[in-house]
Structures are given as structure tokens and as C-alpha cells.
């Protein structure tokens, strides 16, 4: 496995921290695990910290990521709603936000940013990502 991830359930959200080389299937496995933790613990906000995930995605890979996240979101438990923010660095994250646009255009409440505080604000989380 190229991606290692750790899930922490916090009072306000689920935190998924990833590390390693980007591979779509493994990233989706981590996101799905975050969805399951959110469902099990009745959280509606998921923070994906990908600042230690490396990779330089092509435009097509960015499209595939956004499409796959939308499909995964569409398979969430009926009646559940998750607001998702992803924090990462270039070149993994595209400054033009193409993958984000693809997901959002498919009705996923999703934000991709390179700034942790921006992700926290979008999720309406007042404390830091690992504060209990």
C-alpha cells in the first residue's frame, strides 16, 4: 500500500490523515473509511489532511478523482450528509481546483485547499483539527 491513513473521531468531526504516494484506489479507501467513521459516530464533517500525500496528477487523474469522490458520496448511507474538506499541497492539489469543481458539480459538499484554517472555516470548526 502506498497510502497510510489514520482516522480520529473528534467531538466536531472526523479527521483522516494520509501519508504516502497518491494512488486513487487507496485514497478512496481512506475517504470511505472516513465516511464510515462519520456515520458510526454521527458526525457530518470530515477533514481530510493530505499534506503528507505526494503526487503530481494529470488533468485526467484530477477528473477521475472528482468523479470517484462523487460516486463514493452517492453511495453513502441513506439520509446521511457529510461536508468534506481536503487540505493538501501542490502539486497534489491543483491551484485551479479542477478535481474540486468536478465533485462539486456532482452535488458533493467538498472544498479543497492548501490552507488548514480555510478548511476549518469551511467546515465551521472553531478549534484546531486535532483538538479534543
Image (cartoon, helix red, strand yellow):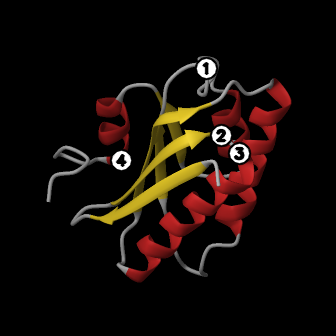
Q: 56 or 123, which is in the foreground?
A: 56
Contact flag, marks 2 and 4 (Cβ < 8 Å): no
| Distance (Cα) linking label 4 and label 3 | 26 Å
Element class at badge 4:
helix
Q: Earlier in the sequence, mark 3 or mark 1?
A: 3
Query: What is the C-alpha distance between the residues marked 3 and 1?
Result: 14 Å
Does residue 76 appear left or right of residue 38 in this picture?
right
Q: Disc 3 vs disc 2: Cβ atoms closer than 8 Å? A: yes
Q: Residue 123 bears which disc, if any?
A: 4
Local secondary structure at mark 2: loop
Identify the mark nearer the N-term, 1 or 2: 2
Q: Are marks 4 and 3 in contact (CB under 8 Å)?
A: no
Point out which mark residue 91 bears: 1
The answer to whether one can see residue 26 in this image is: yes
Residue 118 at what x, y percent from top left?
35, 31
* Numbered circle sitting on residue 23: 3
Picture residue at 59% right of the left edge, 17% below the top? 95
- Is 5 situated above or below 105? below
- Front: mark 4 or 1: 1
Cα distance between the residues tagged 1 and 2: 11 Å
Residue 81 visible in the displayed image: no
Q: Earlier in the sequence, mark 4 or mark 3?
A: 3
Mark 2 or 4: in front is 2
Amino acid at each position: 500500500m502506498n497510502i497510510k491513513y489514520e482516522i480520529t473521531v473528534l467531538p466536531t468531526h472526523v479527521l483522516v490523515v494520509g501519508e504516502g504516494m497518491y494512488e486513487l484506489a487507496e485514497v478512496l479507501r481512506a475517504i470511505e473509511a472516513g465516511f464510515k467513521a462519520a456515520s458510526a459516530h454521527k458526525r457530518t464533517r470530515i477533514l481530510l489532511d493530505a499534506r503528507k500525500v505526494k503526487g503530481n496528477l494529470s488533468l485526467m487523474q484530477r477528473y477521475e478523482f472528482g468523479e470517484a469522490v462523487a460516486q463514493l458520496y452517492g453511495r453513502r448511507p441513506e439520509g446521511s450528509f457529510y461536508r468534506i474538506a481536503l487540505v493538501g499541497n501542490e502539486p497534489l492539489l491543483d491551484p485551479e481546483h479542477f478535481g474540486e469543481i468536478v465533485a462539486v458539480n456532482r452535488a458533493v459538499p467538498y472544498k479543497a485547499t492548501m490552507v488548514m484554517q480555510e478548511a476549518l472555516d469551511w467546515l465551521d470548526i472553531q478549534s484546531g483539527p486535532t483538538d479534543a
